[in-house]
Image (cartoon, rainbow, N blue to C red):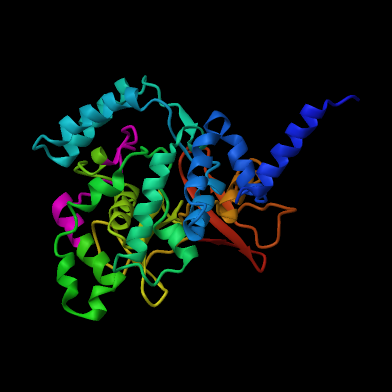
């Protein structure tokens, strides 16, 4: 095969430039950049921006390396019609159940809008990512409630540019921190409270509860999801995940290290549950319910939970394994027990009653006996 000198020199130059970049020897980062397609230049601009700041560069790498799998709405202009209508509804002095029923009806109409999603790798801008990284670092280094975090904790509790997938890529850190910061300055009265993540989370959670008038609705909320947090902040009702997500966004905008946990399915009843945790100065995650109960207040102590997961920005190998559940097939239950064979040792069973459609229960086998959770 004949190769021209120009082609050979160009190939060698390309390899040399790649090797000389700070990200040239990171295969996971390179894989993410490759998936960005035409948007790769935007992501590389972020890396180049921080080439003289090693810690911020590592933060940028963390976000980009773990960006595959994160997505946003492809056409926010279309979906904004629904959110603008919701803003109008939420401004009316109506009872939460009435707002829910109205939004449920509207959702049938607006379901025809373009709700397609697109990978963040393909649309995120360098300016947006740089603003988020700089703001998160400012809250970590110059704020008062997250100085106890190490870099790894910072990457999960403060750094992420979004709380959930689908969320708008807007300046949520800016517009959420003002309305819920009341009385935080009162914590300056002592060195202990001034740097206490628990104290700060308690003050802000009180503000959330008092200003949003928390109203939990546990069923019949069939409305389309609200990913524009300006609108979600006005919603006069919600399920536990709505309040948990909003609480994470508000707390992080104020530099308070908070994330959320959830159990996807109660073992003894329908639905699941989500709540929040704050990473306390002593290194422990303290449970609380966003917009409801404060850190330290007992939370569902009398409820058995089958499995609890923590939401994170980086992919969780355990959660990825959830997609590899194996069906053991259908059986007709002639007694209260079902017997399966050739199953993994210590297997967890998720049984769905097809005759009733929705009833699900979790069980294990212990010493040969079927144990319902």
Provide residue 49's location: percent of width, then percent of height: 47, 47
Q: Nearer the viewer, residue 241 or 91?
A: 91
Give above or below for 91 relative to 111: below
Give above or below for 96 relative to 212: above
Q: Please give the range of residues in magenta.
A: 206-229
> Does residue 223 belong to the magenta stretch?
yes
Provide residue 216's location: percent of width, then percent of height: 24, 49
Give above or below for 57 relative to 219: below
Residue at image location 12% in from the left, 36% down from the top:
91
On-image quarter of the N terminus: top right
Looking at the image, residue 9 sits to the left or right of residue 37; the answer is: right
Give the farthest residue toward the front: 5
Q: Nearer the viewer, residue 153 or 353?
A: 153
Can residue 306 be seen here? The reply is no
Q: Main secondary structure of the magenta part?
A: loop
Provide residue 241's location: percent of width, then percent of height: 35, 49
């Amino acid at each position: 095969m004949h190769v021209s000198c120009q082609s050979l020199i160009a190939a060698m130059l390309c390899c040399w430039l790649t090797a000389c970049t700070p990200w040239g020897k990171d295969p996971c980062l390179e894989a993410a950049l490759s998936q960005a397609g035409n948007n790769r230049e935007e992501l590389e601009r972020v890396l180049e921006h921080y080439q003289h700041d090693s810690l911020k560069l590592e933060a940028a790498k963390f976000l980009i390396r773990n960006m595959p799998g994160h997505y946003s709405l492809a056409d926010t202009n279309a979906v904004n019609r629904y959110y603008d209508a919701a803003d109008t509804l939420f401004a009316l002095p109506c009872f939460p159940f009435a707002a829910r029923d109205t939004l449920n009806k509207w959702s049938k109409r607006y379901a025809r809008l373009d709700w397609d999603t697109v990978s963040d790798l393909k649309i995120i801008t360098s300016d947006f990512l740089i603003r988020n990284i700089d703001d998160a670092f400012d809250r970590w280094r110059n704020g008062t409630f997250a100085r106890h975090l190490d870099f790894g904790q910072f990457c999960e509790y403060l750094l992420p540019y979004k709380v959930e997938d689908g969320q708008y890529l807007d300046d949520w850190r800016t517009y959420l921190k003002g309305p819920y910061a009341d009385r935080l300055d009162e914590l300056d009265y002592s060195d202990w409270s001034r740097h206490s993540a628990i104290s700060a989370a308690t003050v802000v959670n009180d503000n959330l509860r008092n200003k949003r008038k928390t109203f939990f609705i546990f069923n019949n909320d069939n409305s389309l999801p609200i990913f524009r947090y300006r609108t979600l902040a006005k919603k006069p009702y919600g399920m536990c995940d709505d309040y948990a997500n909003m609480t994470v966004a508000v707390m992080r905008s104020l530099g308070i290290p908070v994330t959320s946990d959830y159990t996807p399915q109660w073992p003894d009843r329908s639905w699941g549950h989500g709540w929040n945790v704050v990473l306390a100065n002593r290194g422990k995650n303290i449970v609380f319910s966003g917009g409801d109960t404060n850190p330290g207040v007992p939370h569902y102590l009398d409820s058995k939970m089958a499995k609890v997961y923590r939401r994170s920005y980086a992919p969780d190998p355990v959660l990825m394994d959830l997609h590899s559940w194996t069906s053991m097939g259908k059986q007709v239950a002639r007694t209260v027990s079902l017997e399966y064979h050739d199953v993994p040792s210590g297997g967890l069973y998720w049984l769905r009653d097809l005759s009733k459609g929705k009833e699900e229960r979790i069980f294990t086998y212990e010493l040969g006996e079927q144990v319902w959770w």
